[in-house]
Image: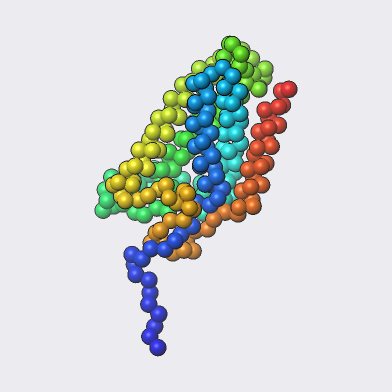
């Protein structure tokens, strides 16, 4: 009897990458950010929906931060947040096909984009709780801030909108770059949760779906009580 063959070095496997918690967060956040942007441009009565979008975004962000510690392999911050050396190496690999190394989840360079996006959106959602427009809209926690601080936060809220748009544009440009330059489709794994890669199937695992649902619900309840705290 012949010995079993070892897998070819360049053989690909279906490897779990993005668990359901990350995928729900990603696509829900996309829809809510677009809805928030559209409703704030419409103004008027649409500001009510803009506020609801902000509350939902805040709940998602709370969930994602917690999931970054208890989620699946590639959802955890420890799997992709690295030091300056790793970031520079990732940048060189991004620009040079011969140095490019396969990454199942976020690479160290992409981690900076993720952290920047989380920080910008978190500031936008939290500051929105305290702002006012001097006409008809007041955030639910406006009374806790007072007029002077609320006005300052409103200015930063408007400025941060441009930061978020720039980060979104950078994110889309990176997806296009990896697709055309490295032939690496970053969107498909975010839909299916699975990536065709040279890594072994046991190299990563998905987080618990039940735990993700519980944490999402808990985040939503927490934001609900926060929003209604001043009433």
Q: Quadrant of the C terminus?
A: top right
Residue found 69% across the figure and 37% down from its top: 221
Task: Say above or below: 55 vs 66.
Answer: above
Q: What x and y, as percent, mark residue 178?
A: 33, 46
Residue sticking out furthest to the bottom? 1
Residue found 40% across the figure and 58% down from its top: 196
Q: What x and y, as percent, mark residue 69?
A: 57, 47
Residue sticking out furthest to the top? 134
Residue 85 visible in the snapshot: no
70 vs 176, left or right, is right
33 vs 9, left or right, is right
Residue found 42% across the figure and 47% down from its top: 187
Q: Quadrant of the N terminus?
A: bottom left
Residue sticking out furthest to the right? 231
Q: What x and y, as percent, mark residue 176?
A: 34, 42
Residue found 51% across the figure and 41% down from its top: 27
Count the numbered circles shown.
Answer: 0
Along the viewing direction, whichever of 92 and 58 lies nearer the viewer: 58
Residue 95 visible in the snapshot: yes
Q: How is the image coloured?
A: rainbow
Q: What x and y, as percent, mark residue 171?
A: 40, 38
203 vs 129, left or right, is left
């Amino acid at each position: 009897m012949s010995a079993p063959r070892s897998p070819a070095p360049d053989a690909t496997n279906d490897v779990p990458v993005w668990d359901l918690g990350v995928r729900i967060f990603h696509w829900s956040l996309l829809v809510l950010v677009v809805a928030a942007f559209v409703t704030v441009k419409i103004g008027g009565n649409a500001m009510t929906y803009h506020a609801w979008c902000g509350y939902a975004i805040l709940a998602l962000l709370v969930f994602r931060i917690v999931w970054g510690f208890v989620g699946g392999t590639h959802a955890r911050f420890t799997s992709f947040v690295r030091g300056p050396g790793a970031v520079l190496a990732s940048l060189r690999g991004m620009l040079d096909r011969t140095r490019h190394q396969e990454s199942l989840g976020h690479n160290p360079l992409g981690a900076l984009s993720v952290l920047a996006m989380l920080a910008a959106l978190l500031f936008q959602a939290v500051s929105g709780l305290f702002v006012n427009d001097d006409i008809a809209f007041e955030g639910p926690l406006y009374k806790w801030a007072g007029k002077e601080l609320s006005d300052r936060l409103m200015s930063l809220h408007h400025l941060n909108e441009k930061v978020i748009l720039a980060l979104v544009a950078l994110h889309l440009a990176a997806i296009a770059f990896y697709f055309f330059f490295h032939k690496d489709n970053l969107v498909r794994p975010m839909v299916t949760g699975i990536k065709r890669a040279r890594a072994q199937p046991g190299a990563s695992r998905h987080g618990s779906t039940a735990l993700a649902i519980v944490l999402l619900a808990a985040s939503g309840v927490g934001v609900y009580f926060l929003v209604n705290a001043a009433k």
